[in-house]
Image (spheres, helix red, strand yellow):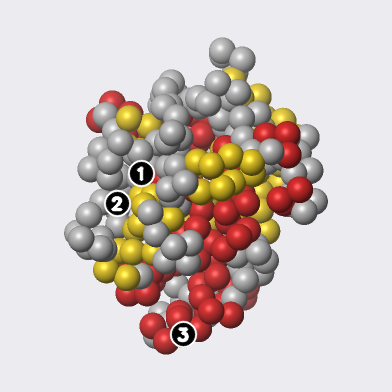
Amino acid sequence: MSLSWETFPILSSALLMRRYSPPPSVSAMDEPGPPIWPAVEQAVEALRISDGTGIKVAIIDSGVEVTHPALEGIQLADDISVSCDGVNLKIEEGVGSDVYGHGTAVASLVLKEAPGVTLGSFRALDSSNHARSFVIAECVNQAMARGYQIINCSFGCRGLPRYVMDYKEWVDRAYLQGVQIVAACSNVGAGIREWPAYFPSVLSVRGIDCAEDEFFFRPERMVSFLAQGERVEVPWLNGGTKIETGSSFAAPLIAGKIAKLMAGIPGISPASIKPLLSMLAKPEEA
């Protein structure tokens, strides 16, 4: 059964902007050199030899069960829980737990692809498999303020116009700051509009039946990438495992590949990631 959850926006993007405090600006002396636009050959080599070391990946999900045997005692760089008491946001330290199982599965797939990455858990999902859009936005704010270069969003909100600004504000800010947003598309079909997958700057992913190391590119589509997402064995709650299907489980594989590119090519231009991946991927199978 495919996994996704529906989100319900409450706060306006203006409120979210007032809540967010961007990191301090970098002085001219500390500025890095010009970003690198690597050749395809460099990218191929980076995917082959890199393990993602030095890259921070944020999991916006249901938490991560750090004691799960499949994660081998992982130490999270950050473990944050964001919730709402009906009126106010509550931002608390997590306790290394997962309230649903989904986040543990997603974290394991990022690590399977890029075992050297640094993971952070930002819990937005509740035990009923739901989240609020403003809770998700606060999780993203927390991750960006802590310097995460990749944010995995294995969820989707119905792609209705009245919801768009609740997602567009932080998706655009991530793009301008060079943060890569990776999102799962609708499990009903890639043509079903959902946020944040249906923003052009997002690397949107659909799950298909293919080998674990394969990924595909679909030109001129909002959901551009395809990776393994059918009948995937993943860790779940209380040290258990499940066989799951859904785009939720394809997105973290692409997030891991991005981490390997960023680690293997220091200084790579964030704007080059999506076109590079499109050249490294196989063309979509008919």
Amino acid at circle 2: Val
Q: Real-space Cα distance between discs 1 and 2?
A: 7 Å
Kindly report the distance in space between the C-alpha atoms of the residues bearing marks 2 and 3.
25 Å
Q: Is residue 267 above or below residue 112?
A: below
**Dot 2 corresponds to which residue?**
223
N-terminal of the two: label 2 or label 3?
3
Q: Is residue 17 left or right of residue 278?
A: right
Which of the two residues, 67 or 38, is positioned nearer the viewer here? 67
Answer above or below: position of 276 versus 67. below
Numbered label attached to residue 283: none
Q: Return the residue at label 3.
A: 42
Left or right: where 92 falls relative to 17: right
Amino acid residing under circle 3: Gln
Q: Position of residue 224 (x, y in %)?
A: 30, 57
Residue 147 image offset from top left, x and y in percent: 61, 55
- Quarter of the image for the N terminus: give it: top left
Label 1 sits on residue: 185
Q: Residue at (58%, 39%) from the top-left corner?
A: 242
Label 1 with label 2: CB-CB less than 8 Å: yes
- Nearer to us in this view, 228 or 258: 228
Amino acid, disc 1: Cys
In the rendering, at what x and y percent does residue 273 appear? 41, 68
User: Which of 204/170 is in front?
Assistant: 204
Q: In the image, what residue occupies the spot 80% across and 51% down?
A: 73
Q: Position of residue 111 (x, y in %)?
A: 63, 58
Callout 3 crowding tier (Cα within 10 Å): few <14, some 14–19, many ≥20: some
Query: Residue at point 27% right, 68% down?
Result: 283
SS at circle 1: loop
Residue 174 visible somewhere in the drawing:
no
